Amino acid sequence: MQLMNSKEGTASEKNLEFYEQMFNALADRIRLKIISEISKSTNRQLCVCDLEEILDLKQSKISYHLKKLVDADILSTEKHGTWNYYKVNESHLQRIVSEEVCSTIL
C-alpha cells in the first residue's frame, strides 16, 4: 500500500480508510512490542519462533498480530526454508508517522 495524497489538500474517504488501517495496526501494545523487538534484533528480522520466546506468547496470538502488521504494510515477510521472517518496512512506517503526513490527514 502507498500513501495517498489528496489533490485538494483535504482528506478523502480513501485517505481516511488508509490511515485508519495504519493507525489501527499500530494501536496495540503487542504489535508495538513486535515492531520494537524486530527493530532491536541483530539482523533486524525475526520469525514467529523467536517472537514466541521473547514475548512469551503463543504462536497463534503472535501470528494474528503479525498478519495485521503485514496487511498494513508495516512488516514484510521473507521466507527462509520453512520459516517466514518478518522485517519492519521502515521507510513506510516513517512516512506514516511523519509530522508532515499527520498534520495533513484532516
Image: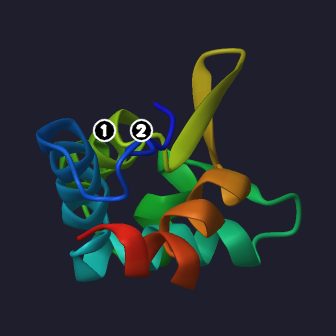
Give the residue number, with chain letter if any, for mark 1. Answer: 67
The residue under the point 18% across, 57% down is: 20
Q: Quadrant of residue 95?
A: bottom right
Question: Who is closer to the viewer here, 70 or 100?
Answer: 100
Q: Amino acid at mark 1?
A: Lys
Can you say whether 41 is above or below 50 in the image?
below
> Does residue 98 show up?
no
* Mark 1 Cα-neighbour bin, 10 Å: few <14, some 14–19, many ≥20: some
Q: Amino acid at mark 2?
A: Val
- Circle 2/circle 1 CB separation < 8 Å: yes
In the rendered image, residue 71, in percent from the top left (x then y), is placed at: 34, 34
The residue under the point 39% across, 71% down is: 104
* Mark 2 Cα-neighbour bin, 10 Å: few <14, some 14–19, many ≥20: some
Residue furthest right in the image: 43
In the rendered image, residue 26, in percent from the top left (x then y), is placed at: 32, 69
> Does residue 4 show up?
yes
What's the colour scheme? Answer: rainbow
Q: Quadrant of residue 17?
A: top left
Give the residue number, with chain letter if any, for mark 2. Answer: 70
